[in-house]
Image (spheres, grey):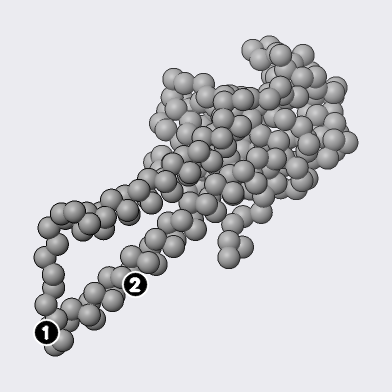
C-alpha cells in the first residue's frame, strides 16, 4: 500500500518508514471513519426524511460520547509520540562515531560540499569544495555539519530518509549511513527563492574500493578520517 515511497538506502530509513506507516494508518483509518459518519448523517438527517435530531446536553452517560473519543485519540497520540521519540533519539541525539565528516552549505541556489582532504582537518590547504556533488562510501557512517550562507534551505535526500533545515548562523550536526552504491537525488525542500526548483545535486554512494579511487582522483592520496 505504501509502494510509492522512494527506495530506502539508509540504515535508519526503516525506522523512519515505520513511524511514517504508524501515523499514516492511524490518521487514514480516522479520516475514512469520520467521512463515512459525515456521509451517514447527511443521508440520515436529510430534510426529506423529516428525522428529528436529538439535543445532547452532555450530562451523565451522554458525556461518554466526548470522553471516550478523547481518551482513544490521546492513547493513539501518545503511542505515536513514544515511537517518534525513540526514532528521534536514535537518529538525531545519539550521533554514532564517524568515518568521514563533510561540511554542507546551502546557498541560493546550490549545495556546497567541503571535504577535509587527506589530513582530515578542515581549514587547511587540502580542503576541497565541490558544488552539488556529494561522494560517500557505502556502509560507513558519514557525519555532516550543515549551514546556510543566506536564507533557510532544507537538505533533503529522499532515499536516505534525511531532511534537515539549513539555517544561516547555525551549524547543525547529523549523520547517515548509505547501504547501497548508486546515484541518488539531493534536493532543497524549503522554498528559498526564485531558483529553488533548480537547487539540487547528486549523491554518489561508492563501494569502498571505488571510493578510494575517487579520493585518489581528487587528492592523489587516500583520505583519512576527520577528527
Ligand atoms: Cu534552497
Which element carries disc 1, helix, strand or loop?
A: loop
Q: Is residue 144 visible?
A: no
Q: Mark 1 vs mark 2: which is more N-terminal?
A: 2
Q: Residue at x 46, y 56 (%)?
A: 26
The answer to whether mark 1 and mark 2 are in CB contact below 8 A is no
Q: Work out whether residue 36 or residue 88 is closer to the camera in this orientation and state it.
A: 36
Q: Work out whether residue 51 or residue 136 is closer to the camera in this orientation and state it.
A: 51
Q: Residue at x 71, y 36 (%)?
A: 177
Q: Is residue 118 left or right of residue 76?
A: right
Q: Work out whether residue 106 or residue 217 is closer to the camera in this orientation and state it.
A: 106
Identify the residue under disc 2. Answer: 36
Q: Quadrant of residue 57?
A: bottom left
Q: Residue at x 60, y 33 (%)?
A: 91
Q: Quadrant of the C terminus?
A: top right
Q: Quadrant of residue 7?
A: bottom right
Crowding near pointer 1: few (<14 within 10 Å), some, many (20+)? few
Identify the residue under disc 1. Answer: 50
State whether label 1 is within 8 Å of ligand 1: no
Which element carries disc 2, helix, strand or loop?
A: helix
Marks 1 and 2, how far apart at CA: 21 Å
Residue 134: x and y in percent read: 67, 36
Amino acid at each position: 500500500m505504501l509502494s510509492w515511497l522512494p527506495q530506502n538506502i539508509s540504515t535508519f530509513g526503516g525506522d523512519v518508514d515505520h513511524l511514517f506507516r504508524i501515523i499514516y494508518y492511524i490518521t487514514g483509518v480516522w479520516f475514512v471513519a469520520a467521512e463515512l459518519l459525515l456521509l451517514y448523517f447527511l443521508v440520515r438527517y436529510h430534510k426529506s426524511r423529516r428525522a428529528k435530531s436529538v439535543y445532547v446536553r452532555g450530562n451523565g452517560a451522554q458525556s461518554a460520547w466526548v470522553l471516550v473519543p478523547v481518551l482513544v485519540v490521546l492513547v493513539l497520540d501518545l503511542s505515536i509520540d513514544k515511537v517518534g521519540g525513540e526514532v528521534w533519539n536514535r537518529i538525531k541525539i545519539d550521533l554514532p562515531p564517524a568515518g568521514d565528516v563533510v561540511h554542507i552549505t546551502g546557498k541560493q541556489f546550490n549545495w556546497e560540499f567541503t571535504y577535509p582532504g587527506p589530513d582530515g582537518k578542515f581549514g587547511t590547504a587540502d580542503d576541497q569544495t565541490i558544488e552539488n556533488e556529494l561522494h560517500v562510501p557505502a556502509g560507513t557512517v558519514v557525519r555532516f555539519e550543515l549551514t546556510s550562507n543566506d536564507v533557510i534551505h532544507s537538505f533533503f535526500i529522499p532515499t536516505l530518509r534525511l531532511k534537515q533545515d539549513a539555517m544561516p548562523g547555525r551549524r547543525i550536526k547529523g549523520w547517515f549511513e548509505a547501504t547501497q552504491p548508486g546515484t541518488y537525488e539531493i534536493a532543497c525542500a524549503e522554498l528559498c527563492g526564485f531558483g529553488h526548483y533548480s537547487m539540487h545535486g547528486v549523491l554518489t554512494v561508492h563501494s569502498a574500493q571505488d571510493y578510494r579511487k575517487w579520493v585518489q582522483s581528487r587528492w592523489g592520496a587516500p583520505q583519512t578520517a576527520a577528527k
